[in-house]
Every structure is written in C-alpha cells, then in structure tokens.
Amino acid sequence: MDAGDTIVAMASAAQEGAARVVVRASGSGALRIAREMSDVGEVAGGSAVVAKVWPGVWRWVYAFVGPRSYTGEDSVELHVPGGHVGRMIVEEIVRRGLARPAEAGEFTARAYLNGRLDLTQAEGVAATISAAGERQARAARQLLSGELARRLSPVMEDLAALLALVEVGIDFSDEDVTFVAGEEVAERSGEAAGALDKLLAESVRFERLSAEPRIVLVGRPNAGKSTLVNALAGQARAVVSDVAGTTRDALSARVRLMRGAVVVVDVAGIAEGEEGVRGSGDEGSGGVTGVLTSVRHEGAPDGEEGLDAIERQMRERALREVAEADLVVLVRAVDDARAPVDLPRAPDLVITSKWDLDGNASGLALTVSALTGAGMDDLRTRLDEMAFGADVGGVLALNARHVAAVEAARAALGRVAESAALGPEVVALGLREALDALGDVLGRMSADDLLGRVFSQFCIGK
C-alpha cells in the first residue's frame, strides 16, 4: 500500500442498472483526472459541476482539495450512470497512467494515515458496509462517530499524566522529592480500571449483533410451549401432544418478526419432583422445584441407569440453552395455579398460554392462545421489542479486537495497583503496557501488521 501515488476505484456497488455509481480517485493527480476525463476544465476544491464525462455522458463531477476530503488528499468523484460505464472509466484512467487501481480499504487507510479517522472509526466504515440489519447499522454508525475514542481518550490522558509523574520521579530518584505517592498511583489506576470495566459492561459485541437473537421457551411439561413454537414459526416444527413431557430435546425454529428474524427454542419441560428428576406424570407431587422431567416410556428400564442417563442429558441440555439464551420466556398454562417454576436466571418475559381454556383469565403476564391466535400479535410485538428494541445506536458496540485490547489494559492496571509499593520502575512498566493496549484500540500506536489486518477486510473502493 503506497500512500504517495494516485489511486482510483469504484466506490459504490457496480450495479448495471443503477442510476448513479461513483468512481473515486485520490492523490496528487486526482484533479488532473477531473480535467482529462471530462470537459470541466480547471476545478476548484469543494466544487460540484455537471460536465461531459468520458466516454460522452453528462454527469456530476465533485472535486475536493486536501486536507478537506475523505482521505485528506486531493480527491475527485465522478458520478456516472450504471456499473458498466463506471468500470470503463476506471479502466481508461488506469490505461492512461493517471492512477493505479486502489487496493482493498486503501481510501479509508489513507484517511486514517492522514489523521482524518482513528482506527475505530475506520472499522466503523467497514462495519457500516457489511451491516446486515438495523442493529448492526446503528452500532456501526456509533463506532464511526468516534464514540469509542471519546470514551477512551480521558482514560488515556489521565494514565499518560500519571506515567509522566512516575517517570519524573524516576529521573529525580536521587533527590528528596516525591512527585506522586504510591497511594495516589493506586487510586488513579483503580479509577482508570473502573472506567474500563464500565465500558465493557455497558457495551455490546458486534459478533452478537451479527447473530439472530436466541429466545428460549421454558415452563412445566404440557404448558403449551411446543404449540407456541409452531404458531410463531407458521409450521409444525415441534411435536404437540396432550401427554406431558413430549418434548425430550431442544427444538428450534426460525421466526420472522417485524424488524428481523429470531431463533425460538423449545426445551424439555421443567416440573416439581422429589430427589432429583422424576417423570412428568408426577408433576403434582411436592418437593424441590426447578428439576427437569420426562415421560417414562414402555420398555424403559425400571432402574435408574438408563432413564437417569437420558433425563440427565435432557436437564443439562435445557439448562445450557437457558444459560446461553439471549432471552428467556417463561410459559405458564392458564389452568396452572401453582407458583412459577424455579429457573437458573430470571425470565425476561412471562406469558400465560392456553387462553382458550379460560377467556376471562387476566393478570400481569401476557395471555395468549396458540390455537385461536388470541394475543399472538401482542406476543410477536413483545418479542420484537425485546430482541430489537434496545437503542443500540446509543450503546457502544465493540469487536473482538477492541475487547481484547481493553481487557489487556485492564489487566495491566490491576498489576499497577498491586505493585504500587514495589517501586516507580515497576509502576511505569504497567502504565506503559496499559497505554500501549489502549493505543492499539485507536491505532495511535499500532504496528504495520495490525493495520494490514484491519484494512485488508475492506472492499475495493473504500
């Protein structure tokens, strides 16, 4: 990647029938391209004119003079009709020797190298391009706006100031002067660590945004979970029976809601039992709540070995699904007056099923009937709000690289707090490690291989 020459590429999707596609050039020869590839003549920075662009189409020509451009260099954009014309113009520019083809991500890399973007904003460009839905697009815009830099910069500035005091103390170690006490080092590094903990706790992960939210339905056997899954999915995905405990494994169905798709999972029923797991036919017995049950089929061994192995796997699978779910929905039958079953985590939503059995039922829980469809629109709306309603545009999203760097800085600060009494050299080393890690996030101290990995993920023309 050579930042000293002029580059050109398509900067928009090259669709054949598109009313407008963008050919972008950047570098010292960009304004010359505008003159030679159109009849615009001399162009001034910040201008937009209609001109006849080679090979004879009338379209807009935009000129930008660095540093007031996307890349920080002289730049030109030719807006022409259709991807075929755009490709012809790029090939002609290269044939005339006016520019070379841009590499993947090279325009944004130049913007970064020229100080127009920090590395997180550059990643926000890539995330915006690859966004597959509203949540990802809003999170990408948040990153592109520079929010992560705004959150990290005060922490970095305070750590840099603290490191300066520590290093001055090292330089004047022979003098009877104290520039910063060990207690203050521990306190300020602890405050910085707390700010990083808060950042991680309040942020979401881009990797999670790219996956469809996973919603797990839990409840007692015969609570109507499988019927709900079938009604939401619009097909008979799960086996439905009046016999409690029919569901013996986790069954999933992809459900399309208003703002995106989710995966709804139906797990084996949870019921009351004695001394661990019992058959669902015993659900009326007292005892410890929150254990998984199953139906003992004919031919099953009377002993504990065979049945317990199956029940143990069912229980482990159900608990794993609940633990890994993005959202947990507790389903209670309208004719079940017992207290809710115990769960390893609080449910995000409680619904009362089988409303058709008692149309007068009311309460705080959302009441639905999968058989008649009553309340199902409300249920879909609630699921959509829970899965996609969070204002991701107001919440920072971090990718795996950001998280790893922040966690590395957090670990270094932990060592600083623990070693504050061991001497300024040890403290300074820990502060430098924390600053280097946070610098990697913003790209202010990044190595060439890190930059290569980031920008190689871009597409041509960006």
Image (spheres, rainbow, N blue to C red):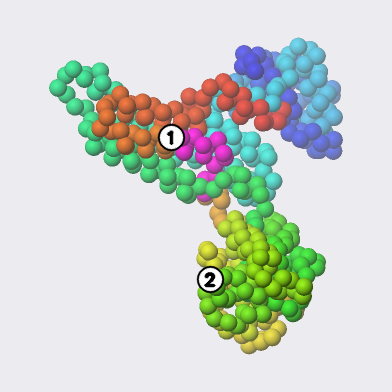
Report x, y in % for residue 93: 77, 17
Q: Secondary structure at mark 2?
A: loop
Q: Residue at x 76, y 11 (%)?
A: 97
Q: Residue at x 75, y 15 (%)?
A: 36
Marker disc for residue 342:
2
How many numbered marks have been drawn onto this rendered protein structure? 2
Between 316 and 122, the one nearer to me in the picture: 316
In the rendered image, the quadrant that contains the N terminus is top right
- Mark 1 or 2: in front is 2
Sequence-first disc among 1 and 2: 2
Q: Quadrant of the C terminus?
A: top right
Quick one: 306 or 187, which is closer to the camera?
306
- Residue 214, given in percent of the width and then of the height, sits at 65, 57
Coordinates of residue 78 in the picture (x, y in percent): 73, 27
In the image, the segment drawn in magenta is 395-409
Amino acid carrying label 2: it is Asp
Q: Where is residue 127 drawn, in percent x and y? A: 63, 39
Q: Nearer the viewer, residue 218 or 260?
A: 218
Which residue corresponds to the image point at 23% horizontal and 37% vertical from the top-left?
183
Give the overall secondary structure of the magenta segment. helix
Q: On the rendered structure, is 125 left or right of 429?
A: right
